[in-house]
């Protein structure tokens, strides 16, 4: 009888442990409610806008224009976005000028499907779509970063559009 009870206890323990779910299965849906700071803004090309001799794709390393930018998601489906801008002009001698422009606040709405966050973009038909993973949201905007170059040969200003990726970190 003692053997049967021990076997039964081991079986019950095994079933209890096997029925526990794991957060490591990748099926956990994270929610974005709260404030998120912009902690990285990656562009396609590397530049040395800060003149330290090290070119980087991360605008956070090259200019302070984006420090303090944030996005805040509310439970009611609203979102507040606080963004600054940088005006960058590169002349024919590869000299550049970076001008930080005061930011502005945007209000919109958001939805979530799994780990995909969609923010309605009221300025055009392309909504902003990001992925939430742990304490970060990653959002890529195609052709959203613009740099002006002076073309001395044609005496013209050339505009280069690049994709950029914004990484938000939960506060």
Image: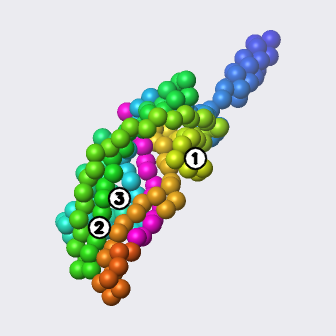
Can residue 163 be found in the magenta stretch? Answer: yes
Can residue 47 be found in the magenta stretch? Answer: no
Indicate the position of residue 84 as horizontal and vertical percent values: 33, 46
Q: Residue furthest bottom?
A: 153
Callout 2: few (<14), some (14-19), or many (20+) C-alpha neighbours within 10 Å?
some
| Quadrant in which residue 145 is drawn | bottom left
* Residue at 35% over, 85% down: 154
- Relative to 76, 40 lies left or right: left
Q: Secondary structure at mark 3?
A: strand
Task: Please tell me whether residue 56 is drawn above or below residue 111 in the rendered image.
Answer: below
| Quadrant in which residue 23 is drawn | top right
Tell me the distance, in whole angstroms, between the alpha carbons under discs 3 and 2: 17 Å
Q: Are marks 3 and 2 in contact (CB under 8 Å)?
A: no
Tell me the distance, in whole angstroms, between the alpha carbons under discs 1 and 3: 23 Å
The quarter of the picture where the C terminus appears is top left
Residue toward you, 15 or 45: 45
Q: Secondary structure at mark 1?
A: loop
Q: Which mark is residue 89?
A: 2
Circle 1 is placed at which residue position? Answer: 127
Q: Which mark is residue 62?
A: none
Q: Which residues are magenta?
A: 159-171
Circle 3 is placed at which residue position? Answer: 58
């Amino acid at each position: 009888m003692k053997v049967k009870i021990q076997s039964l206890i081991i079986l019950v323990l095994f079933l209890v442990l096997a029925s526990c779910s794991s957060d490591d299965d990748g099926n956990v849906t994270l929610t974005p409610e709260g404030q998120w700071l912009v902690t990285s803004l990656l562009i396609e090309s590397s530049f040395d806008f800060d003149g330290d001799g090290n070119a980087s794709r991360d605008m956070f390393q090259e200019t302070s224009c984006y420090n303090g930018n944030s996005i805040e998601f509310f439970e009611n489906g609203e979102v507040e976005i606080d963004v600054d801008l940088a005006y960058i002009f590169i002349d024919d001698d590869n000299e550049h000028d970076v001008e930080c422009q005061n930011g502005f606040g945007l209000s919109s709405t958001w939805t979530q499907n799994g780990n995909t966050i969609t923010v309605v973009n009221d300025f055009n038909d392309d909504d902003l779509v990001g992925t939430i993973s742990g304490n970060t949201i990653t959002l890529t905007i195609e052709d959203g970063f613009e740099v002006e170059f002076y073309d001395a040969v044609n005496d013209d200003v050339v505009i280069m559009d690049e994709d950029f990726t914004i990484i938000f970190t939960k506060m």
